[in-house]
Image: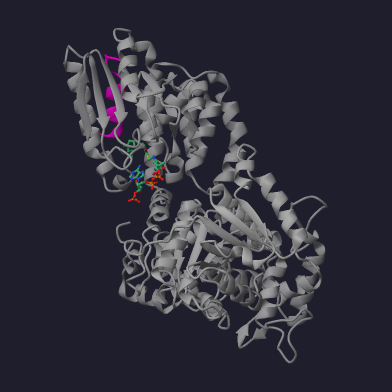
């Protein structure tokens, strides 16, 4: 609702709809009623609109989208029209975050005040829509088309000070916002409101709009990676040169197009899923859930290993204000890491944050920390050795976490006397940038340990997802099917750049081969050597070239590594790289290697369509997701989606792999395609449809209903 009160001649409308004061239907109704009341009352000479509690309205109520409630009268457009055309001056007084419809309300007001900490922006693009309550028409009239395009297509929030410099807010006020706003409102009483209406202004440099749009188009399309909202926002902004009503009509038309597209619900699902993962639970052990399990307080963290991961994790922890003891037995590596950490931390706070860092070469220095995150090389023997030492030196309550990307947490826990305090915390590189934290419970991990790992994720600004223990956990296990099929495609005729192009056109930032070169082709190779699938010199003795343990196997990635082509770091991998450049260039040497291989093993080269490449790579990945759900490794399909959205670059406008499977491809079609492909390639195990998928198609039912995410 919006609470109505008067302070002398000023009517104050305070939106009260926790947690973020979104414009649910009852709020819109209350605002329209309040404005009418203020207009009618001759004693009222000005109006202040603000938010109660933590924020100015943060936008439309996203939960109303798709239910029809968003368009129930009065809709947001009518509220803003009432504000704009009000005969008495309307002042928006902003604190917290004025976002989306909230910011549009402020733009429809005649004056805007903000506290210094306020932020504002139009993030609708992240929800697959556009600022459809006049945002695409009013903002360019204030800041110009170029800045409006930048703000609206990025969805970025700006700070009050920047809003002041851009002419968006009229004044930054210190102290009590209500008092300041009321005093400001009194000062403008009686002044004409006509020339304060942004809707009646014209766009600056209107004649250059087409030029500006043309200049922005290429970058926007590249960044959009298949999302339709960004360019549609631009089309709406382009219409701001028209008379206001005509521009609004164009905005409404484009908004309707986006609202009814398949991408908008996918992105709104992604928005809520990102928040829903905070309500985690173990699918079977009722003690392990966010409601009842209590975390331990973590003030200090030990990090073992100062390689790329250990360093990134340390930066992340320091940035969050935690004390860190970083242990590295190699002095040179330790010094190098400290230098990099210093450089990476922002200038402003570097010295304060660095004072929280202690370096160590001796395990005993970890004795007092609350949790240790092991980030040594991905090798079970080495990890066990580290955990034995940690178990011996740390206080009994210390939680021991492993940043393994797929090794068995139970096996690691078994070398300690505290398996209940062992947990997996799988960070993604670069660890100080990537938002995902995949937390893994073992058979004996206690509720308190799980809760502590999940809470640590919150403290350091991660999106934490809780999963069970299996080789590769959720993310890398699903990725295994994807990369396996990608190399099978090379056998049949595709070239690395064909596969990468198709996957990038689908919306991934990088295809599997460019990604392999970036992370290092030897990572997977060492893993396969450790598993005995290959050796540094080729297949293990008496092993057929194309099979391992009865499963089809493609040795091309091993052959690449045996040539010393370990990716960007060696200047050559699946592609070649000019010195100092990261641009992947197709390499005749690799293409010849693949061609020779095809010939040697009797593969006949054929042309493979982009559609087949996408289906062959992504459908097995999704299929693995069904196995994972079936086994209870992920509690809900949204957990898998969030892992892929935040850790693997899965395009957000498709909602994530499981959402995409169900709502975009359709489970029946997915099953049918997998059946077709598995009939063609009977020895590609990951193409065999999962029993859960078969069952769901046979019996009906939705993925959401499998877990607890049914409210989405
Ligand atoms: C066909 C033509 C139709 C024409 C008629 C329609 C006319 C015009 C219609 C629309 C135009 C305007 C559109 C919009 O405004 S879309 C919304 C734009 N706003 C946003 O995208 C903001 C989203 N929220 C955030 O970014 C953050 O929540 C935050 C910065 C506001 C606060 O962050 P934080 O403190 O970290 O809190 P949480 O993110 O955890 O959020 C808390 C809680 O609140 C829920 N929530 C947040 N925002 C919304 C919202 N806009 N609607 C509904 N619910 C929201 C969030 O889900 C959390 O819930 P919880 O998990 O249950 O705690």
> Which of 300 and 406 lies nearest the eye of the viewer?
300
- Residue 334, by quadrant, is bottom right
Rendered view: 80 above or below 293: above
Rendered view: 261 above or below 178: below
Is 644 left, or right, of 377 in this rendering? left
The picture quadrant for ligand 1 comes to top left
Residue occupying image coordinates x 49% and y 65%: 439
Residue occupying image coordinates x 46% and y 17%: 202
**Where is residue 638 shown, x and y percent of the image?**
41, 61
Stretch of the chain drawn in magenta? 73-89
**Where is residue 69 shown, x and y percent of the image?**
25, 43
Quarter of the picture containing the C terminus is bottom left
Taking the magenta stretch, the answer to whether it contains residue 646 is: no
Quarter of the picture containing the N terminus is top left
> Which of 538 and 405 lies nearest the eye of the viewer?
405
Can residue 1 be seen? Answer: yes
**Where is residue 594 shown, x and y percent of the image?**
76, 71
Can residue 656 be seen? Answer: no
Taking the magenta stretch, the answer to whether it contains residue 77 is: yes
**Where is residue 313 shown, x and y percent of the image?**
59, 56
- Residue 195, by quadrant, is top left
Rendered view: 147 above or below 550: above
Rendered view: 190 above or below 49: above
Is 30 left, or right, of 561 in this rendering? left
Is 72 left, or right, of 295 in this rendering? left
Question: For the image shown, how many numbered marks are present on the structure?
Answer: 0
> Which of 469 and 233 lies nearest the eye of the viewer?
469
């Amino acid at each position: 609702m919006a609470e109505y009160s008067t302070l002398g001649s000023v009517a104050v409308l305070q939106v009260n709809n926790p947690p973020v004061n979104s414009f649910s239907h009852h709020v819109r109704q209350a605002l329209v009623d309040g404005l009418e009341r203020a207009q009618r009352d001759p004693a009222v000479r000005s109006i202040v609109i603000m938010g109660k509690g933590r924020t100015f309205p943060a936008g439309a109520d996203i939960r109303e989208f798709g239910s029809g409630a968003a368009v129930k009268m009065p809709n947001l457009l009518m509220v803003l029209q009432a504000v704009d055309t009000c005969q008495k001056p309307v002042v928006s007084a902003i604190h917290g975050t004025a976002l989306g419809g909230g910011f549009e309300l402020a733009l429809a007001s005649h004056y805007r005040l903000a506290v210094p900490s306020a932020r504002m922006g139009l993030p609708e693009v992240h929800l697959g829509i556009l600022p459809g309550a006049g945002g695409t028409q009013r903002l360019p009239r204030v800041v110009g088309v170029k800045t409006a395009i930048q703000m609206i297509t990025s969805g970025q929030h700006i700070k009050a000070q920047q809003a002041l410099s851009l002419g968006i807010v009229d004044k930054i006020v210190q102290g009590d916002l209500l008092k300041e706003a009321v005093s400001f409102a009194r000062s403008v009483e009686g002044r004409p409101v006509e020339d304060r209406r942004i809707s009646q202004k014209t766009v600056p440099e209107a004649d250059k709009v087409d030029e500006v749009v043309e200049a922005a188009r290429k970058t926007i399309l590249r960044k959009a990676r298949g999302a339709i909202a960004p360019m549609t926002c631009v089309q709406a902004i382009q219409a701001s040169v028209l008379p206001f009503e005509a521009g609004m009509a164009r905005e409404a038309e484009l908004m309707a197009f986006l609202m009814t597209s398949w991408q908008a619900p996918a992105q709104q699902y992604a928005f809520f899923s990102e928040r829903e993962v905070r309500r985690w639970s173990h699918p079977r052990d009722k003690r392990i859930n966010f409601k009842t399990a209590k975390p331990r307080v973590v003030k200090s963290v030990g990090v073992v290993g100062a390689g790329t991961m250990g360093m990134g994790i340390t930066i992340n922890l320091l940035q969050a204000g935690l004390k860190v003891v970083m242990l590295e037995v190699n002095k040179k590596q330790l010094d190098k890491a400290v230098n990099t950490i210093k450089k990476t931390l922002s200038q402003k706070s570097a010295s304060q944050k660095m004072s929280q860092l202690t370096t160590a070469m001796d395990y005993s220095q970890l004795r007092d920390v609350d949790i240790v995150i092991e980030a040594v090389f991905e090798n079970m023997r080495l990890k066990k050795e580290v955990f034995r030492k940690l178990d011996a030196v740390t206080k009994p309550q210390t939680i021991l976490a492993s940043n393994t990307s797929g090794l068995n947490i139970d096996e690691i826990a078994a070398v300690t006397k505290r398996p209940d305090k062992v947990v997996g915390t799988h960070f993604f590189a670069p660890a100080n940038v990537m938002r995902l934290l995949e937390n893994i419970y073992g058979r004996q991990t206690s509720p308190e340990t799980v809760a502590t790992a999940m809470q640590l994720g919150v403290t350091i600004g991660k999106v934490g997802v809780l999963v069970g223990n299996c080789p590769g956990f959720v993310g890398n296990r699903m990725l295994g099917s994807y990369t396996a099929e990608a190399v099978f495609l090379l056998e049949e005729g595709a070239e690395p750049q064909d596969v990468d192009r198709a996957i990038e056109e689908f919306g991934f930032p990088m295809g599997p081969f460019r990604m392999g070169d970036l992370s290092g082709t030897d990572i997977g190779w060492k893993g396969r050597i450790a598993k005995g699938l290959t050796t540094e010199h080729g297949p293990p003795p008496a092993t057929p070239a194309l099979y391992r343990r009865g499963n089809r196997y493609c040795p091309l990635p091993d052959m690449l590594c045996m040539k010393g082509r370990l990716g960007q770091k060696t200047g050559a991998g699946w592609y070649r790289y000019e010195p100092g450049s990261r641009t992947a260039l197709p390499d005749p040497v690799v293409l010849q290697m693949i061609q020779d291989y095809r010939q040697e093993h009797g593969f006949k080269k054929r042309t493979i369509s982009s559609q087949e490449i996408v289906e062959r790579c992504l459908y097995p990945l999704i299929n693995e997701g069904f196995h994972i759900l079936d086994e209870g490794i992920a509690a809900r399909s949204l957990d898998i989606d969030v892992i892929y959205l935040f850790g693997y670059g899965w395009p957000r406008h498709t909602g994530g792999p499981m959402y995409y499977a169900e709502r975009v491809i359709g489970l029946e079609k997915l099953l049918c395609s997998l059946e077709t492909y598995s009939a063609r390639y009977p020895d590609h195990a990951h193409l065999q449809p999962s029993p859960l998928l078969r069952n769901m198609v046979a019996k009906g039912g939705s993925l959401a209903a499998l877990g607890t995410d049914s409210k989405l």
